[in-house]
Image: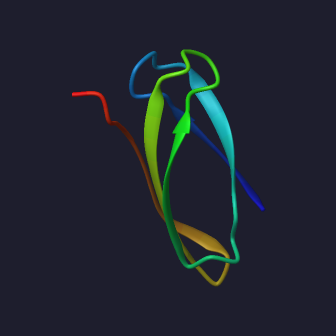
Amino acid sequence: MFEHFFQCPYCWETISMLLDTSLSATSYVEDCEVCCRPIQISAAFNNQELISFNAEDIEQ
């Protein structure tokens, strides 16, 4: 597991998320731990190294 810190696209608070490094790519929705709004998370790993991460709002 890999802990990654980023800003919520809604409330701009810094939050952390544990990402599974055994997956080469993953995409899912998780609620912000501060404002509880849904965030679309996308992450990609290469040899257990984070190569891309995106956190987007899905309420448009």
Residue at point 64%, 84% (across, down): 47
Residue drawn 55% across and 32% down? 31
Name of the residue lying farthest toward the bottom: 47
Residue 12 in the image, given as x and y percentages of width and height:
46, 20
Q: Is residue 20 left or right of residue 7?
A: right
Most foreground residue, 2 or 38 = 38
Asked if residue 18 is positioned above or below residue 24 in the image, the reply reads above
Q: Is residue 21 left or right of residue 58?
A: right
Number of numbered labels in the structure image = 0
**Which corner quadrant holds the N terminus?**
bottom right
Q: Quadrant of residue 52?
A: bottom left
Q: Position of residue 33 (x, y in %)?
A: 64, 24
Q: Nearer the viewer, residue 20 or 59?
A: 59
Residue found at the far right of this picture: 1
The colour mode here is: rainbow
Q: Is residue 54 above or below residue 32?
A: below
Residue visible at 67% across and 37% down? 16
Q: Quadrant of residue 19?
A: bottom right
